Image (cartoon, rainbow, N blue to C red):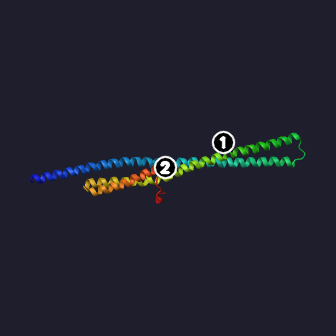
Amino acid sequence: MQAEDAAEMMDQDKQNDTFKQRAAIGIAFLAMLLAITSLGGSNAGKEATNNNIYASNFYAFFQAKNIRQTEISLAADAFELAFLKEAGLDDQAKAAIKAKAEAYRKTAARYESEPETGEGKKELIARAKEFEQKRDHALRQDPYFDYAEALLQIAIVLISVSIVATLPWLAFMGGLVGLVATVLMVNGYLLLVDIPFMS
């Protein structure tokens, strides 16, 4: 072996080492993005589940209030009918029946809206819809994280193989896949663009 050949091999080894170092840094960076993406996807899934539970709870509470309101309205109607039917009642009994019917009507009206407690039907339905919106937002985020995770894993594999096979073009492809995955991850957090097939 001549000195020129040895120098050429050393230059090639140096280039290979530089390529391997850059590829390793790329893998480390993509692994970091993968962790961030995984966290975002996990949080989106939890948010969707929790907000769905909250929305269901408020809808159930709304239904219970609606049933109670209906029952109380029916009871008030029954008292008013008794008041009209029974002509032989004394004034004190009539006043008691009328007062009871009025109390039931007030309770039924209170069930419609209770801003001070936030437990009226209007407030409950508003809170249920608020949690539905939060759930829907998290469900819109989730697919972006899923696709970003898969693409980041593919990018890491491509760059890893490029190190073993010493194929820079494969590392370049892995970098492009990683770039697409990064865009999807950022969109998962911010929902800047609505991609039709991912919704």
Residue pictured at 29% horizontal, 57% vertical: 170
At label 1, the amino acid type is: Pro
Q: Secondary structure at mark 1?
A: loop
Q: Is residue 58 left or right of residue 151?
A: right
The spot of residue 73 in percent (x, y) is 75, 48
Cα distance between the residues tagged 2 and 1: 32 Å
Q: Nearer the viewer, mark 2 or mark 1?
A: 1
At label 2, the amino acid type is: Gly
Q: Is residue 8 left or right of residue 105?
A: left
Provide the residue designation for mark 2. 45
* Label 2 or label 1, whichever comes before in sequence order: 2
The one of 119 and 86 positioned closer to us in this rendering: 119
Residue pictured at 73% horizontal, 43% vertical: 107
Provide the residue designation for mark 1. 115
Give yes or no for contact between labels 2 and 1 (Cβ–Cβ under 8 Å).
Answer: no
Q: Of all residues shown, which one is farthest toward the left?
A: 2
Q: Of all residues shown, which one is farthest toward the right?
A: 88
Q: Local crowd at mark 2 within 10 Å, few (<14), some, or many (≥20)?
A: some
Q: Is residue 180 left or right of residue 45?
A: left
Residue pictured at 33% horizontal, 52% vertical: 156
Quarter of the figure with residue 176: bottom left
